[in-house]
Image (cartoon, rainbow, N blue to C red):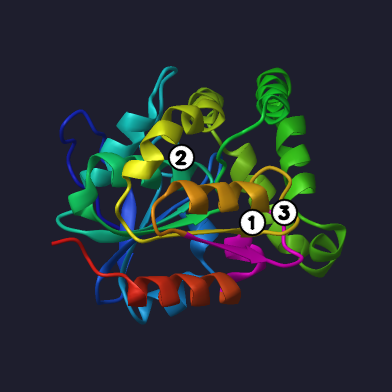
Amino acid sequence: MTAMGAMGGSVALSHEGHGAGPDLVLLHGVGLDRTMWQRCLPALAERHRVTVVDLRGHGASPPAVPGVSLQELAADVAALLTGPAHLVGFSLGALIAQQLAAVRPELTASLTLVSSVAGRSREARAAVARRRERALEDFEASAHAAVERWFSPEWRTREPELARSVLTILLKNDRTSYLACYDVFATADAGLWPRLPDITAPTLAVTGSDDPGSTPAMSRLLADRIPGAHALVVPETRHLLPLERPEELTEAVLTHTGSARAPL
């Protein structure tokens, strides 16, 4: 494990490196940590120098305070980079990757946006607000509801230990940090929307066909909004693509990074 000093208002993120090759950075979602990439990491590290990160407020990284912004979370990641990297972001991590691509194009070789939200409807925003209130009122019940939402009954029966592991990670969260980062996840896509046409990095948006929050329609919106972007929908899959369909996701990422050229 390595850590780097604060830079430009950023905090030093806990992270680790694997493999060799062009730089690739893996960014997790709200309430999770870098271990969510465990099933994708071996194959990715065969072709890339992979950095897996605990975002601010998660894992072994410093806490997040109320009012933390998407810009600050992106600056944390930018402080780790010394040149262009392929950014692979999941959920909140996908929003951070979009922010980096918009403001630091020289650091962005490509984007893979996994289970990303975009163009939320009024109803979708209301549902996210309700989940936030539930987390504030009864965090444990909220964590259990997330696992129920993310795992199909068949998957949970097949891998009960994995479902318990994800639940344990959720329950370990510092509540203040979780809510601060959840607020970013719940609102930042609206601010990003007008900036998406300015993104120049080659972009792939991928989600599961059965993901009710980061829907196939949202990935198609991203593909339509970001110049030259493409969408991919993985059949019979919910939200946790890196854990539920690691082979399919890894193949998509490597195909995308292999065809993308780093910015000059």
Q: In the image shown, does 208 or 218 lie closer to the viewer?
A: 218
Q: Residue at x 46, y 47 (%)?
A: 94
- At a point 32% along the width and 47% down the height, the residue shown is 199
Choose between 142 and 197: the one closer to the eye: 197
Q: Secondary structure at mark 3?
A: helix
For residue 88, what is the image quadrant? Answer: bottom left
Residue 230 vs residue 262: left or right?
right
Check disc 2 and report its element: helix, strand or loop: loop
Mark-to-mark CA distance, 1 and 2? 17 Å
In the rendered image, the vertical position of residue 105 relative to residue 144, given as above or below: below
Region in magenta: 230-246
Residue to which mark 3 is pinned? 164
Give residue 30's position: percent from left, percent from top.
54, 39
- The x, y position of residue 26, in whole percent, is 40, 57
How much space separates mark 2 and mark 3, taking CA atoms?
18 Å
Q: Tell me which amino acid carries mark 1.
A: Leu
Identify the residue position indicated by label 1 in the image. 240
Q: Residue at x 20, y 28 (%)?
A: 9
Depth order, front residue of 137/231: 231
- Left or right, residue 102 beside residue 135: left
Amino acid at pointer 3: Arg
